[in-house]
Amino acid sequence: MSDKYIVISEVRDGELRHVSFEAIAAAKEINADAEIVGVVVGDGSLESLAKELIYYGADRVISVSHEKLKTYTSEGYGQSIMAIINDENPAGIIMGHTSIGKDLSPKLASKLETGLISDAVAIEKDDDQPVFIRPIYSGKAFEKKIITNGITFVTIRPNNISALEKDESRSGDIETKNVDIADIRTIVKDVVRKASKGVDLSEANVIIAGGRGVKSEDGFKPLYELAEVLGGAVGASRGACDAEYCDYALQIGQTGKVVTPDLYIAVGISGAIQHLAGMSNSKVIVAINKDPEANIFNIADYGIVGDLFEVIPLLIEEFKKVK
């Protein structure tokens, strides 16, 4: 193998986030012949998570388990991962462009004194030179970037690069590394999480998002029902969050989460540019709005002009028939 690429995985509620597997696929796209070294950090036994990384394409996995890694801190995770990077001397590092990735990757890049390409949504090849494509100007344009020297350090946007097929017949070495984590300044006393049950919003393949047009907190109930039928997640515009129809954890947009599901159903959302910045790269966009002049229809693949409280129940009924 000509190169070695480290893939930094991410754990949520005791399970690997799917972007961890997408990052392995991205490393393979950059260099199909490279050795892929998965990294998983946390507390307790991490063997089952390490095996999952092997099944999805990692050649070997290094795990770091420590009580100070039970909850994410940039200092704790940074010390652990830097110890692995220094030992492995990789040609590249890949991780997800998630809340953790956004926080941790620039700090690692600074310590390594190398550049960072963030939020890549696709990888192309130009005479074997990997070309990374990332959105700019709130998703209105795309730029192509190459790395001319140093480590290839990239974060990838979830749901844009398809993970490899899971193969439980694959095997690889799993190494447990002991890292002496020095005293960290950030101490997490408790974690209070407001999260909806079901699919994680940032990795959902189907999202039903509500705006001010839902009119109230009760107006979101049909959206949750439709999401349950489709196996998706519920999101919201900032307008709906500001109106206290739902929690800010559901906010999608320039100041919220950036999502790229296979199907995005915008319900009662006018289509402000700030919201479009967070969802305009969705593969299929369906807009439901009673205002035929709403800006959301300009980017929608399919539009339904009508009262959402009449349209959503009809959709639920029809989807139940074909489920």
Image (tube, rainbow, N blue to C red):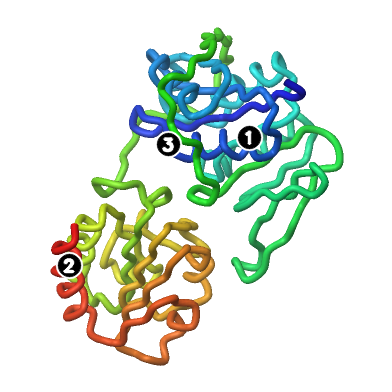
Label 3 Cα neighbours within 10 Å, binned few <14 / some 14-19 / many ≥20: some
Task: Report helix, strand or loop for mark 3.
Answer: loop
> What residue would you read off at disc 3?
17
Q: Tell me the distance, in whole angstroms, between the alpha carbons under discs 3 and 2.
A: 29 Å
**Amino acid type, label 2:** Ile
Left or right for 246, reference 154: left
Marks 3 and 1 sit apart, C-alpha to C-alpha, by: 18 Å
- Read off the residue under disc 1: 28
Residue depth check, mark 3 versus mark 2: number of the one nearer the observer: 2
Where residue 263 appears, x then y in whole percent? Answer: 38, 62
Q: How far apart, in angstroms, are the residues tagged by discs 1 and 2? A: 40 Å
Q: Amino acid at mark 1?
A: Lys
> Between 214 and 146, which is closer to the camera in this rendering?
146
Q: Amino acid at mark 3?
A: Arg
What secondary structure is found at the residue carrying circle 2?
Answer: helix
Percent of width and height locating residue 275: 47, 70
Q: Quadrant of residue 300?
A: bottom left
Image quarter hosting the N terminus: top right
- Please name the residue that numbered disc 2 is placed on: 316
